[in-house]
Amino acid sequence: MPLTSVKHAVTLRDLLQSALQQLPQTDSARLDCEILLCSVLKQERYFLYAHPDTPIDSRDQADFNSLLAKRAAGFPVAYLTGWKEFWSLHIEVNQHALIPRPETEQLVELALESTPANTKSTILDLGTGSGAIAIAIATERPDCRITATDISLPALSLAQQNAERLGLNNIRFVHSDWFSATGAQRFDLIISNPPYVESDHSGFITGDIRHEPRLALDGGSHGLDAYRRIIPAGIASLSTRGRLLLEHGHSQGELIRQLFRHNHYLNIETKQDYSGLDRVTLAERP
């Protein structure tokens, strides 16, 4: 009798090993594969290590390979899974809003340092995108009244959905081009992570950011267009001794400080991120 071959079941280990050969060999390649596979299997990452010999059915294999092909083409993992962790919160994301970055958590930390607990401070988050910054602050400072604005209605809708899903009711969402719809209200704290990438940056052509909304990234020829609007206009929207906190590119710290000085702000200071790079500049209303 002729021998018949037994088809080997594809396991988690097999699928991950194969997937790693399909992605560019970057520091995040394995993590990307694991996150995408967990998204398909609806499991946490520990499951991959606890059960590496688990067989994977053909449908899950096909779904995973489809996501893997998009990732290999540069599509961001967060858009493929539909979420991103930020401040230990599950933030839903889509292509209408910038994907929250880990370094932006420093902006949240500085905002919290500027806002004592159990106070009813008023806070304005300009260009809220997915709502990640406003939501993180709202969870830590439930007594504060937060206004979150964005010029993009789809982004604003996403932010509102995130806040509602997390049960937050201390954020007001406003459709606004920076300060255009905030009226005469003054805020104790204004924060923003505005667009600061130069218009001719190669990432818009070949990098992952080409898949993110250009409106949320493109800061003009020198990356400073938004700051030239926010910093002068911020004075009229800050309360006495109110503070303006702005995230920016690592090479833009001195330029941002110059803009603050030109507009006569006080106590100007740039803070470094966890990599020792300039990341957030803050100042007080003159």
Image: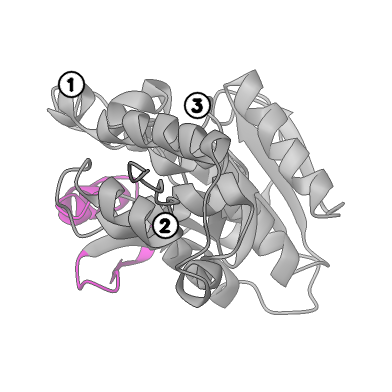
Check disc 1 and report the residue beneath it. 205
Q: Closest to the observer: 83 or 40?
A: 40
**Which percent across, then down, holds residue 209?**
30, 32
Circle 2/circle 1 CB separation < 8 Å: no
- Its colouring scheme is one colour
User: Could you tell me which secondary element the residue under label 1 belongs to?
Assistant: helix
At horizontal 61% and vertical 28% (from top left) the residue drawn is 155
Q: Is residue 183 visible?
A: no
Q: Is residue 267 left or right of residue 41?
A: left
Magenta highlight range: 249-277
**Which percent across, then down, holds residue 100?**
47, 48
At horizontal 52% and vertical 71% (from top left) the residue drawn is 51
Q: Which mark is residue 95?
A: 3
Q: Quadrant of residue 149?
A: top right
At horizontal 68% and vertical 79% (from top left) the residue drawn is 116
Dot 3 amino acid type: Gln
Q: Is residue 11 above or below residue 67?
A: below
**Disc 2: CA contacts within 10 A as few (<14), some (14-19) or many (>=20):** many
Residue furthest front in the image: 1
